[in-house]
Amino acid sequence: NAGVTQTPKFQVLKTGQSMTLQCAQDMNHNSMYWYRQDPGMGLRLIYYSASEGTTDKGEVPNGYNVSRLNKREFSLRLESAAPSQTSVYFCASKFGGEEFFGPGTRLTVL
Amino acid sequence: QKEVEQDPGPLSVPEGAIVSLNCTYSNSAFQYFMWYRQYSRKGPELLMYTYSSGNKEDGRFTAQVDKSSKYISLFIRDSQPSDSATYLCAMSAIPNAGGTSYGKLTFGQGTILTVHP
């Protein structure tokens, strides 16, 4: 099992560009999450999906959209990137009490 | 005020020391408490998970929860250089139900720990 995979690993964007961060899990988990991690801020929830076909806003959803394509895949889209979105993005899936995290995507917006 | 407060450190200790990491929280609805370990440039991984007040031990690690004081701790005995990482506390208010879970985690800021030989 690959667990939770994320692509790309690194990305540099210019202000105003758009991009989609991809996440997939092969553990058959219902719940999936997108977080961003900034220095001194811990992990902050952007969006989550409790099950296929449903998505909900987390703590910091502004500037982002998500799609739960199927049970395996949960993508995060930045429609018009801003420097404030420079961060490390983590996708996670959950079963029972444990969240399994992907390796992260390091995004820089210039 | 953040719902979960964690001293970001950094914390530097000699090998073999006992390490104490702490979080306080304000939301009395939090029922599930977790500690995650995150190595540099990696995703967090679950280290300890506990529900009730009291202590839970796993090898060199002990998680302690005091719901009356809204305070949780992680103790690391005989610390090793391989324990050097960022430690994040996390909490959830909604219980898990069977194979599906809707509980959202609220994380502390993370404490950077370095154990030097």
Image: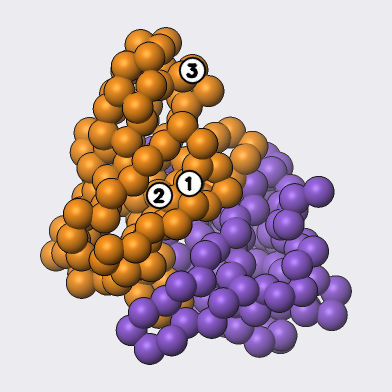
Chain colours: A orange, B purple
Residue B100 in view here:
yes
Name which of mark 3 and mark 1 comes first in the sequence.
1
Q: Position of residue A33 (x, y in %)?
A: 39, 56
In the picture provided, is B37 more to the left or to the right than B89? left
Disc 1 packing (10 Å; few <14; some 14–19; many ≥20): many
Q: Position of residue A70 (x, y in %)?
A: 18, 60
Under tag 3, what secondary structure?
Answer: helix
Q: Position of residue B55 (x, y in %)?
A: 67, 84
Amino acid on which the number 1 mark rests in the picture: Ile
Q: Residue at x 42, y 76 (%)?
A: B101
Q: Is residue B112 above or below residue B68?
A: above
Q: Is residue A28 above or below residue A58?
A: below
Q: Residue at x 46, y 19 (%)?
A: A82
Chain of the residue where label 3 is placed in the rendered structure = A
Question: Do residues under tags 2 and 1 come within 8 Å of each other at their CB atoms?
Answer: yes
Chain of the residue where label 2 is placed in the rendered structure = A
Quarter where residue B11 is shown: top right
Amino acid on which the number 3 mark rests in the picture: Pro
Disc 3 packing (10 Å; few <14; some 14–19; many ≥20): some
- Give the label on residue A46, or none: 1
Disc 2 packing (10 Å; few <14; some 14–19; many ≥20): many
Q: Is residue B58 above or below residue B88?
A: below
Residue of label 3? A83
Locate the C terminus of chain A by quadrant. top left
Residue B44 in view here:
no
